[in-house]
Image: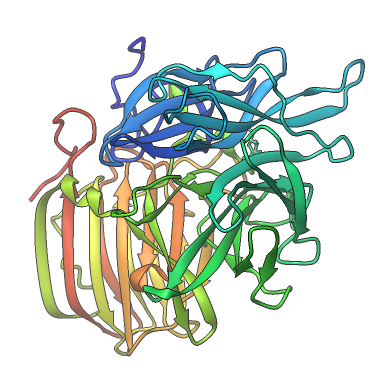
Amino acid sequence: MMRITTYDEKYRPQFHFSPAAHWLNDPNGMVYYEGEYHLFYQHHPNGTTWGPMHWGHAVSRDLVHWEHLPIALAPDHNGFIFSGSAVVDWNDTSGFFSGGSGLVAVFTHTDTYPGTERSRQRQSLAYSLDKGRTWNMYEGNPVLAEEHIDDFRDPKVFWDERINRWVMVLAAGDRVRFYSSPDLKEWTFSSEFGAEDGSHDGVWECPDLFELPIDGDEGNKKWVLIVSIGDNPGTPEGSRTQYFVGEFDGMAFRNGNRSDTVLWLDYGRDNYAGVTWSDVSAEDGRRLLIGWMNNWKYANSTASGVWRGAMTLPRVLSLRSGPDGIRLVQIPVKELQRLRLWSDRWDGLRIEPGQNPLQGLRGNQLEIEADFEIGDAGQFGFKLRKSEREQTVVGYDVRSSTLFIDRTKSGTADFHHEFACRHGAPLPPENGRIKLHIFVDWSSVEVFANGGKVVMTDQIFPEPASTGLELYAAEGAVKLVSMKVHTLKSIYSSRDPAAVAR
Ligand code: FRU
């Protein structure tokens, strides 16, 4: 790839995936095969705004360091390449692999109905005989079309051994549809879900469906259906992702909660279109998700450089039962710990208003693990990426039991009037404690609270010199049971983190 970046542009993420250049949106086709995690993504290779969609491509052996590869899928006579998934066809059900195995991508081809302006979205296949390095379009494309449905896209496919068939879930207007197939080529409609369930604030997109044990008990599992919902200019949240927990029998999904229950994957503004990796090995066993760290509300105009767009950190998903029912929990993948460069530790500190134990510490590539015992403080938390003019607050409001991010003064925000905002998530203390696990990069902050029960992912665009760090308490004192602050290495070369003073 032509070197048009030095990976040190003003807002370039230093440990999140971003394209070398040009536009990125949804993660696509994530699959693990022969030691490599593949990450494809919606890509416009000739601009830094959304445009004719291709699949960009990168691979990683550790989910942290990525090697950019050439564009995998480019538009052809069937149209542009929208989102979709990839699977390993282990038993050559498709017949593409002469009895061996290989990768098959299942994605949406989009064009217009001949002689009209009406958009047409159909599902297609491409396959690779060389571990994803080159791709062949299937000559029988498209493999699935429904003329009466306009928004009909983002197929996610997996093998369901109970029915001995591939299952496809895809978005259809403001609901999802399920199909099944013996060979990835012939698809039969099974059922539809969601017309009356969950949030319908926007068009449904990028579904995913998988089974997870509850509280780690392999004998007690539930199915999780993830659905992203598009921007609705009438909501401050913009595009965001909901999920359902229930049963799936190979043909139909049954919601285990009341139909008006809405569960959010992430309470931040910038985690969209996230789906999970296929074919992670059984001995690994993790359900790994990555999302697009952006929001359709302002995605085309964020402060950026030769590229625009990045992914969230990869996360491990699991199900936990609690007082409100069964909920999805997310934690960052453990591989990220390899980026830790220096670590400092504090134990048993009482933080009074006006004190800042982090004074003197600076950083823009940080990981913070903090365990608080709520004392009599009204509010406590961290001010990150701080300077005289800028700060991003990750705080906890005790009276309302709300975790919040305040990015009103986080830096450049003039590209959209709703970007500079404070938003929150309900977070009850557990045994009087609040645990925060925070990642700070050059243009983002991610918070995993109380073991990942609540997650907030937000973009921020601070000046590079805004590297101050503050731990604060207001309206009373808070007890810091323990805290670790890690300075993180960049995933690019051996460059040291910028602006770190110790
Ligand atoms: C979600 C989405 C998908 C679509 C793709 C187009 O962000 O709108 O539904 O396939 O982006 O780039």
Left or right of residue 372, residue 348 in this image: left
Residue 212 seen from this side: yes
Left or right of residue 114, residue 43 in this image: left
Q: Is residue 20 above or below residue 477?
A: above
The residue furthest front is: 99
Where is residue 257 shown, x and y percent of the image?
65, 77
Residue occupying image coordinates x 58% and y 16%: 74
Q: Is residue 382 above or below residue 487?
A: below
Residue 387 seen from this side: no
Residue occupying image coordinates x 87% and y 27%: 118
Q: Quadrant of residue 329?
A: bottom left
**How is the model colour-coded?**
rainbow
Front position in the image: 486 or 87: 87
Q: Is residue 4 above or below residue 399?
A: above
Where is residue 128 shown, x and y percent of the image?
47, 22
The residue furthest top is: 2
Label count reads: 0
Where is residue 283 shown, x and y percent of the image?
28, 54
Front position in the image: 368 or 128: 128
Ligand 1 - quadrant of the structure image = top right
Residue occupying image coordinates x 74% and y 57%: 201
Where is residue 68 shown, x and y percent of the image?
35, 23
Q: Quadrant of residue 1?
A: top left
Front position in the image: 393 or 497: 497
Q: Quadrant of residue 197?
A: bottom right
